[in-house]
Amino acid sequence: MEGKKVRVRFAPSPTGPLHIGGVRTALYNYLFARQNGGTMILRIEDTDSNRFVPGAEDYINEALAWLGIKIDEGVREGGAYGPYKQSERRDIYRKYTQQLLDAGKAYIAFDTPEELEAKRNEIANFQYDASTRGSMRNSLTLSADEVKSLIDAGEKYVVRFKIEPNRDIVVNDLIRGEVKINSSILDDKVLYKSADDLPTYHLANIVDDHLMEVSHVIRGEEWLPSAPLHVLLYEAFGWTDTMPQFVHLPLLLKPDGKGKLSKRDGDRLGFPVFPLEWHDPKSGEISSGYRESGYLPEAVINFLALLGWNPGDDREIMSMDELVEAFSFDHCSRSGAKFDFEKGKWFNHKYLQEIDDDTLADLFAPILADKGVSGFDKAYVSKAVGMVKSRISFVKDLWEQAAFFFVRPGSYAEKDIKKRWKEDTPRIMGELIDLLESIEDFSSKNAEDIVLSWITAHEYHTGNVMNAFRLAVVGECKGPHMFDITELMGKEETIARIKIAIENIKPINA
């Protein structure tokens, strides 16, 4: 493999929505390919016709596009190594299946599901291998005429790989180093099924990786047990010189407890495990997605990249280009990475802070429309969101933080009334109205200087006056700098709100 052009593939099955763990696998493939000037292939592994789900392939493409993971070769992009959908490569797989049969590396098996189940009941921990295949119905125990007769009669069969026992198989992995597994623990895996004239994953992905000249197979740790079989298949075909370098990524683990991250964890703890919202065509169930939950694609990418990998320094906020430059399997963990969904929110918060206020206002516009808010120009909305964006983790949080800029208070926080609205507050607020009406330059700094000087001159309690002022305008004692608020709202709206508060707020005895 020395000096060979880097070609990687992401090969999902269209059996449902793309799991966030699959997204990370795609991302690491992409980062490695881009860093090495290589090619990123998207191959659709749809050989399991029973599990095919309509819409899943489109979902995969849309999710990768949203995240900025660009595909160089694939079903949509085309390329010199296609077709890139396995169901369209039947003729290719038949050829290589026959090659293994002719070489005595594989055999035909006619065992029915009922016969296999009977064997499992008869033999504890049964597996179809060198110790049991001699007692089964296959081309190793039947004559050539019997095999031909069964096939001609339309009997369904599978082709199994013939694994020789008691051999140590070495898998060289860029993260885990040398992994040694004895062949005796492997069963004679099914490579092809006559029922649907399609290969299984094991044969199809080996043939495709070879023919598509894949240089590195970067996939999840869950595929590590199948790696020895794949090494044996490369040997059986005589392709050892072109065997790709294996890389098995650490699992994404539950945020709490043990085990692999699942959709149930997301449902239980309230976070998405899919990049986009998924509508199950069979059950009608809707599963949340990162996009629809308000995450920015750049934040999701940055978050996922650091789950099981680090740049070798203390950087956390990294663009795609920075990730490409820094990426290395040397800094990948061997152990699983806890899925810290709160950290994901933190990344989104950080990325939102970097968005300019005009763009954020555009993102907020649909929420304002949904709330029935209209009549505010873009400049006003931009300034409003700019004042509160440091307090949000998602665009949808803007309404809670900035609603008072667009809608007058319909009620007032009881806890703040108890603490800040006293018997003499209406009188003081009335005086404040007179003062505000006299101010010609209503800019934040000027208005603040005048009001604070007035408070000092009258020996009023600054905290009580200013919090009552805020309560009247905002509806509760929260929000950005008070005089930045009033500058944006303007004198007329500010005074109108104070007048309404004087009429509606009644002191509450603590």
Image (cartoon, helix red, strand yellow):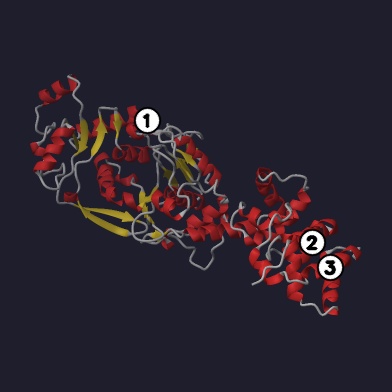
Comparing 256 with 51, the one in front is 256
Q: Which residue is mark 3?
A: 432
Q: Earlier along the polypeptide chain: callout 1 or callout 3?
A: 1
Q: Residue at x 62, y 56 (%)?
A: 352
Specify few, some or many for label 1: CA neighbours under 10 Å numbering under 14, 14-19, or 20 or more: some
Residue 498's disc is 2
The kind of residue on which mark 1 rests is Ser
Tell me the residue that label 1 is attached to. 87
Q: Residues within 10 Å of mark 3 (few under 14, many from 20)?
A: some
Tag 2 or tag 1, which sits nearer the N-term? 1
Q: Secondary structure at mark 1?
A: helix
State the image coordinates of residue 502 (x, y, percent, origin top left).
78, 62
- Give the camera-side residue of 149 and 506: 506
Where is residue 23? Give x, y as percent.
Answer: 46, 48
- Report if the CB atoms under discs 3 and 2 are less than 8 Å apart: yes
From what the image shows, is residue 283 above or below residue 181?
above
**Residue at 85% in and 59% down:** 491
Instruction: Kindly tell me whether residue 60 is visible in this rendering.
Output: no
The amino acid sitting under disc 3 is Leu
Earlier in the chain: of badge 3 and badge 2, it is 3
Between the residue at mark 1 and the residue at mark 3, the CA separation in whole angstroms equals 76 Å
Q: Is label 1 or label 3 in front?
A: 3
